[in-house]
Amino acid sequence: MIIDCHNHVGADLLFYLHGDFPYAQHLVAMHDEGRALGVDRWIVFPFVSHLALDVTGFMQGEIKDEKGRLHDVPYAFENRRLLQEINVMFPEEGKRMLPFVMVDPMRNVAAQAKELRRLRADYRFYGIKLQTTILQADIKHLKERGKVFLELAAEWDLPFLIHSSVAESDVWAQAKDILDIAEANLHLRFCLAHSCRYDRECLDRVNLLPNTWFDCSAHCIHCEGAVEDLPYIAPRARRFDSDFTNPGRVIADLAAAYPHKFMWGSDSPFYSYAGEINGQVVRLISTYEREVAALKFSPPEVITRIASTNTRKLLKLHDESILS
């Protein structure tokens, strides 16, 4: 069984209005393309921006909390919309989905927690996802303002999957800050996305902590970033050693170095990114096929370990019959 542990479903109004790509993915399209490539299950969650932000700033790429909100509670609409799509609109494809809910650790957290309790009374979900860079909401808010999400994860025995960064300019999602939170909450489970941008120090710390994993989402364009020494990748002095011209080789090397902590995920549709940054168009383009091909560079026993066994350990499903 191949479980893709990192996928967005729905639409992102910020990306659409600002002119960035991608800005949407349909559940059925993801399912059909992935099934044709041999993927069996998907961990899915909404896109990143939410309707409790001021949408009037989206065309300029601005994150504001003033007027122009379409909803008062972050992700209340997006989480319920996703779970309705999975359970009501497309239940056949939905049977293969393992939905996570998105949360914002900084804005109106008490109302978010209340909405999540209502949602859980209606639908099952299996984890909590955060992408704090786009929201400009420091992940360290989980320690205080957003502590309620740690409490809910403990109550419901759910893992976290958290967008991570090592770029100096990204003060909101530093991998080391996520690891500090994980170390202070050993009773909870955490997965750091994007291979910690190949930062060896962070990956080694993931390996040492008993409650942390990492995924390789958007792997191929991260390999390209390493080859070109782009700033969103760990600098060479701290970078995991591999041949980044060969994404399959990198997955094999990561799986050998961190055999019980590495999970495979595509980050669909964000295995590609295109947008204007500082007046220049940046195009980092991959495909679902390339992401799966990089996984299948490894032998079957490695594929099973990083695309099923390790993912199940993070999930710790109380009823694994949902995977049959």
Image (cartoon, rainbow, N blue to C red):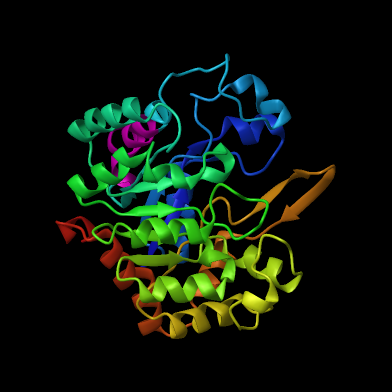
112 relative position to 289: left or right: left
In this rendering, is residue 136 above or below 311? above
Tell whether position 93 is magenta: yes
Q: Image point 27% across, 62% down: which residue?
A: 186
State the image quarter where residue 250 is shown.
bottom right
Q: Image point 33% across, 50% down: which residue?
A: 97
Tell me if I can see residue 35 in this picture: no
**Outermost residue toward the top in this view:** 67
Residue 48 appears at what percent x and percent y?
Answer: 52, 39
Residue 32 appears at what percent x and percent y?
Answer: 45, 52
Q: Image point 40% across, 54% down: which residue?
A: 161
Disc count in the image? 0
Tell whether position 38 is magenta: no
Quadrant (top left/top right/bottom left/bottom right) for the C terminus = bottom left
Residue 94 appears at what percent x and percent y?
Answer: 31, 45
| Stretch in magenta | 79-94
Q: Image point 53% across, 51% down: which residue?
A: 173
State the image quarter where residue 121 is shown.
top left
54 relative position to 160: left or right: right
Residue 300 appears at what percent x and percent y?
Answer: 39, 82
Name the dominant secondary structure of the magenta segment: helix
In this rendering, is residue 109 above or below 1? above
178 relative position to 242: left or right: left
Tell me if I can see residue 169 in this picture: yes
State the image quarter where residue 68 is shown.
top right
**Outermost residue toward the right in this view:** 279
In this rendering, is residue 47 above or below 221? above
Quadrant (top left/top right/bottom left/bottom right) for the N terminus = bottom left
55 relative position to 28: left or right: right
